[in-house]
């Protein structure tokens, strides 16, 4: 099976430092869930850009930190993950964590959705938070 690509794009002035470290980490997380790496695009944007997507595609008139469009085929993960760096920045401040830690949480949140994790009920939210914490620990871990 041919391995897909994990790409990072920016619709604002955000530049992801250590892009390869993030790419390797996302790949490691996907493999740890016994899934296959397809084409996954992370698109960094501002609040207004993501709000427009929320309105247009989900009919939600709210600001959010992440919207993911899952196009996975079986166990091969494909999709687009839009992240508002403005929301991430504000959330980091609200939760008293640094920006990169909050960004990792949001990035892996989208990947976990593609792996099949949900966050609608309290129990699902609890499981999602636990999985986020577990997967964040894999960042920079040598294989």
Image (cartoon, rainbow, N blue to C red):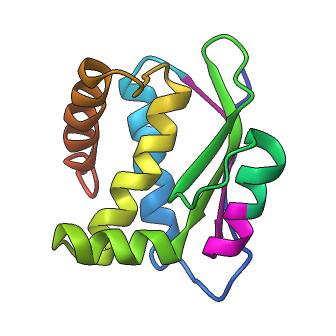
Q: Is residue 78 visible?
A: yes
Q: Is residue 76 above or below residue 97?
A: above
Q: Number of labelled discs?
A: 0
Looking at the picture, tell me which residue is in the foreground, 60 or 69: 60
- In the image: residue 77, left or right of residue 21: right
Looking at the picture, tell me which residue is in the foreground, 64 or 26: 64
Looking at the picture, tell me which residue is in the foreground, 55 or 1: 55
Q: Position of residue 4 (x, y in %)?
A: 71, 38
Tell me the residue at 44%/32% (across/down). Answer: 112
- Please identify the residue farthest to the bottom as the structure is shown: 13
- In the image: residue 87, left or right of residue 125: right
User: Is residue 5 covered in magenta?
Assistant: no
Tell me the residue at 27%/58% (across/down). Answer: 140
User: Is residue 48 covered in magenta?
Assistant: yes
- In the image: residue 29, left or right of residue 10: left
Q: Position of residue 87 (x, y in %)?
A: 47, 70
Q: Is residue 2 above or below residue 40?
A: above
Tell me the residue at 28%/72% (across/down). Answer: 92
Q: Quadrant of the C terminus?
A: top left
Q: Quadrant of the N terminus?
A: top right
Q: Is residue 71 above or below residue 98?
A: above
Q: Position of residue 30 (x, y in %)?
A: 46, 31
Which region of the structure is painted magenta? Answer: 36-51
Magenta region, mostly helix, strand or loop? Answer: strand
- Please identify the residue farthest to the right as the structure is shown: 56
């Amino acid at each position: 099976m041919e391995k897909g690509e994990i790409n990072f794009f920016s619709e604002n002035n955000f530049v992801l430092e250590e892009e390869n470290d993030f790419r390797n980490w996302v790949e490691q997380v996907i493999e740890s869930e016994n899934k296959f790496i397809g084409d996954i695009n992370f698109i960094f944007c501002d609040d207004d850009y993501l709000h427009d997507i929320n309105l247009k595609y989900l009919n939600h008139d709210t600001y959010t930190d992440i919207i993911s469009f899952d196009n996975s085929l079986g166990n091969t993960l494909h999709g687009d993950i839009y992240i508002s760096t403005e929301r991430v920045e504000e959330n980091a401040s609200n939760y008293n964590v640094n920006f990169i830690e909050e960004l990792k949480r949001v990035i892996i949140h989208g990947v976990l959705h593609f792996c099949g994790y949900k966050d609608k009920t309290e129990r699902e939210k609890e499981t999602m938070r636990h999985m986020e914490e577990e997967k964040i620990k894999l960042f920079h871990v040598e294989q």
